[in-house]
Amino acid sequence: MRSVPLVLVVFVLLSYVPPVRSGLNIYIRQIFDSCWMFKGVCKEKCDIDKEETYHILCGTQFLCCIHHKDKPILFEK
């Protein structure tokens, strides 16, 4: 019988906890959104200000944006 008031107190305290944003946290999101050996990020559009360039596709609608220094050399002279 002593546990019933304790359970009620716990439920009351849990009802006052502020809601949090659902979804993956920032670190897990970076792992799943990364592409091309974890050097790129899947985005809808690459940032020219950050010197990002398009390399390959991520799925069907996203681009793999990588920094121009990390872009592989395709041809050597």
Image (cartoon, rainbow, N blue to C red):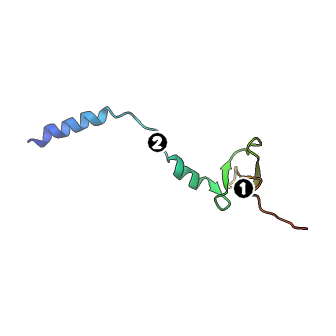
Q: Position of residue 47 (x, y in %)?
A: 73, 43
Please tell me whether residue 74 is drawn above or below residue 31 in the rendered image. Answer: below
**Residue under the image location 64 percent in, 58 percent down:** 38
Which one is nearer the viewer's eye here, 48 or 11? 48
Describe residue 52's horizontal placement relative to residue 20 as left or right.
right
- Amino acid type of the residue tagged 1 in the rendering: Leu
Q: Position of residue 65 (x, y in %)?
A: 72, 51
Quadrant hosting residue 36: bottom right
**Residue under the image location 65 percent in, 62 percent down:** 37
Residue 22: mark: 2
Of labels 2 and 1, earlier in sequence is: 2
Q: Residues within 10 Å of mark 2 (few under 14, many from 20)?
A: few
**Residue under the image location 19 percent in, 40 percent down:** 7
Q: Secondary structure at mark 1?
A: strand
> Residue at the right extreme?
77
- Amino acid type of the residue tagged 2 in the rendering: Ser
Which one is nearer the viewer's eye here, 76 or 44? 76
